[in-house]
Image: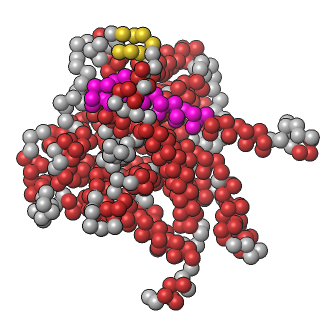
């Protein structure tokens, strides 16, 4: 194709082609390099399936797969059961304080996954005040990983199930009551069938998070081998990149399967539509509401105790021997560390949130409504499903293989801040694209038609009409990217260096060196930054709501 024909292509197709090239550089090429590296030895020579044979013959590596699957299965069952109780109690009962519980149960979302593990060490470890609850069992091992995974995954599963229960058609409850069905029968015939896709999705998400999480096993697994920690040990500990690639592919297979099934479950939930029939009428039941209140507040208190122990211990001299309050743990310079990782995390989170939100929203509009050809849009949507099935540790390892090439232009990016931003945006791109696509589908397509008839450029319609109607979604996506960038560990652990380290990886390094106090302090800073971001988002939403409800006709008074 000559230059003249290229200039005749629609601008949307040119942008789509550039978009696909970006995804090739930062997604397809790294994954291809992972596959290639698994078939090579340390010298780069092709060895076929020799690395896979070595994996099966290496003591402990096949067991790591079995351990990971068992722990993920047990943690999934426990998490989904607790999450369903929490979601049902806060949506289908009149228990006291359910709104407050709905907020407090989300506390672990604002922390790296290592911190609930550290909190469990403080709380029920050998020196913990509640260590007797383990009845003499060892915390480090499968028991600790299961407990930590339940605490880490519970907010995710609860959010999914709460949304699913709120979408159950209210008219079904009215019909069941009119036919004389009691509470138990309504639960079995209406609630459970209506929430079946949410249960499946919550189970698959929990299983995937537990299987791929790096932070909890790193803190609590001990000598109990897990796939996610084996990747780190093979690459960082033994510098065996070929075996690290093989273990990554082994971890990738069950992850891809569960993600595929989760997408099918979410489509099934979407086909059921949203809740109809108005608000659900709830009758007060003292026995039911009291039972749910006891269980839910107990679970919420346990979550807050684990998270709170990290916050409290960060202000103590040396837990549990010297409980004097101090700020020594925050004097990172005196402990051989610095504040640089936290400041780098803030800068990284802001850059990822700004550029990620802007790019993902614009690209979603370009693929859905901006005139991109159907073939390019199909490829774009298909490629953006890939990061959802890539565990963070695997994605980080692929970037080592793809960009650690001194002889190519890719090597210029290795070890740079830009590569951290690109890796993080790609890591969370699937959820961001889906969020933007759903928001754009709700905008009337006549907006673009009216703009074209009036001769308004497409970019002007996008900025002045489409973007304002999706302002809430854009703000939520910004917050999602900001908080997840602050708390992620696995996606960037392989890309950090001595000169460029983020706070979550710094927590890992402090824990490895036995400095639990400074690790808790750094984690507390992450928690505080995420909490401030949430408060700012809520304040902006409230200010926008009040401004929207002001009527200029009535002299600035709110409408009734």
In the image, taking residue 400 as reference, residue 428 lies left or right, namely right
Asked if 446 appears above or below 559 in the picture, the reply is below
Inspect this view and state whether residue 181 appears: no
> What is the x, y in percent for residue 332?
40, 29
Q: Nearer the viewer, residue 544 or 198?
A: 544
Q: Nearer the viewer, residue 232 or 343?
A: 343
Q: Which residues are magenta?
A: 510-535
In the image, taking residue 425 as reference, residue 100 lies left or right, namely right
Q: Residue at x 85, y 39 (%)?
A: 559
**Dividing the picture into quarters, in which one does residue 362 lie?**
bottom right
The quadrant of the rendering that contains the N terminus is bottom left
> What is the x, y in percent for residue 178?
63, 32
In the image, taking residue 529 as reference, residue 72 lies left or right, namely left
Query: For the stretch drawn in magenta, what is the main secondary structure?
Result: helix
Q: Residue at x 69, y 55 (%)?
A: 468
Asked if 183 appears above or below 560 in the picture, the reply is above
* Colour treatment of the image: secondary structure
Q: How many marks?
A: 0
Q: Residue at x 63, y 33 (%)?
A: 280
The quadrant of the rendering that contains the C terminus is top right
> What is the x, y in percent for residue 67?
21, 36
> What is the x, y in percent for residue 266?
46, 49
Magenta-span inclusion, residue 534 = yes
Q: Residue at x 12, y 49 (%)?
A: 55
Q: Nearer the viewer, residue 430 or 426?
A: 426
């Amino acid at each position: 194709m000559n230059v003249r024909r290229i200039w005749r292509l629609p601008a949307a197709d040119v942008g789509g082609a550039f978009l696909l090239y970006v995804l090739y550089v930062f997604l397809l090429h790294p994954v291809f390099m992972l596959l290639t590296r698994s078939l090579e030895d340390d010298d780069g020579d092709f060895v076929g399936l020799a690395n896979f044979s070595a994996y099966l013959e290496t003591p402990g590596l096949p067991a790591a797969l079995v351990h990971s699957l068992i722990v993920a299965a047990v943690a999934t069952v426990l998490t989904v059961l607790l999450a369903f109780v929490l979601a049902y109690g806060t949506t289908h009962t009149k228990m006291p304080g359910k709104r407050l519980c709905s907020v407090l149960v989300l506390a672990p979302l604002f922390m790296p996954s290592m911190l609930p593990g550290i909190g469990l060490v403080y709380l029920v470890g050998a020196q913990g005040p509640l260590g007797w609850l383990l009845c003499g069992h060892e915390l480090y091992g499968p028991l600790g990983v299961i407990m930590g995974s339940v605490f880490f995954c519970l907010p995710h599963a609860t959010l999914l199930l709460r949304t699913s229960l709120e979408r159950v058609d209210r008219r079904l409850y009215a019909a069941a009551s009119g036919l004389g069905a009691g509470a138990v029968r309504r639960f079995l015939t209406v609630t459970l069938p209506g929430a079946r896709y949410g249960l499946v999705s919550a189970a698959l998400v929990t299983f995937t998070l537990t299987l791929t999480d790096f932070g909890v096993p790193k803190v609590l697994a001990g000598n109990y081998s897990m796939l996610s920690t084996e990747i780190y040990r093979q690459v960082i500990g033994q510098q065996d990149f070929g075996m690290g690639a093989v273990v990554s592919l082994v971890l990738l297979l069950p992850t891809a399967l569960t993600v595929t099934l989760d997408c099918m479950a979410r489509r099934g939930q979407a086909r059921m539509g949203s809740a109809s029939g108005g608000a659900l009428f709830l009758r007060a039941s003292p026995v039911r509401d009291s039972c749910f209140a006891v269980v839910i507040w107990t679970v919420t208190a346990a979550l807050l105790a684990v998270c709170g122990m990290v916050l409290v211990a960060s202000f103590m001299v040396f837990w549990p021997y010297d409980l004097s309050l101090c700020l020594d743990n925050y004097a990172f310079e005196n402990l051989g560390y610095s504040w640089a990782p936290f400041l780098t995390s803030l800068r990284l989170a802001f850059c990822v949130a700004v550029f990620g939100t802007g790019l993902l929203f614009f690209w979603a509009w370009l693929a859905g409504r901006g005139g991109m050809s159907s073939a390019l849009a199909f490829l774009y949507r298909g490629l953006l499903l890939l990061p959802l099935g890539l565990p963070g540790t695997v994605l980080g390892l692929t970037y080592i293989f793809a960009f650690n090439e001194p002889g190519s232009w890719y090597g210029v990016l290795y070890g740079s801040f830009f590569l951290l931003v690109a890796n993080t945006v790609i890591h969370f791109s699937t959820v961001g694209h889906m969020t933007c696509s759903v928001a754009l589908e709700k905008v009337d397509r006549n907006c673009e038609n009216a703009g074209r008839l009036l001769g308004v450029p497409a970019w002007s319609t996008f900025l002045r009409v489409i973007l304002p109607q999706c302002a809430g979604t854009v703000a939520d996506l910004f917050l999602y990217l900001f908080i997840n960038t602050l708390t992620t560990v696995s996606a960037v652990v392989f890309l950090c260096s001595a000169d460029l380290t983020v706070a979550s990886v710094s927590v890992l390094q402090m824990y490895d060196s036995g400095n639990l106090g400074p690790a808790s302090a750094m984690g507390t800073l992450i928690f505080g930054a995420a909490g401030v971001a949430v408060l700012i988002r809520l304040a902006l939403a409230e200010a926008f709501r009040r401004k929207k409800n002001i009527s200029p006709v009535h002299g600035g008074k709110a409408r009734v």
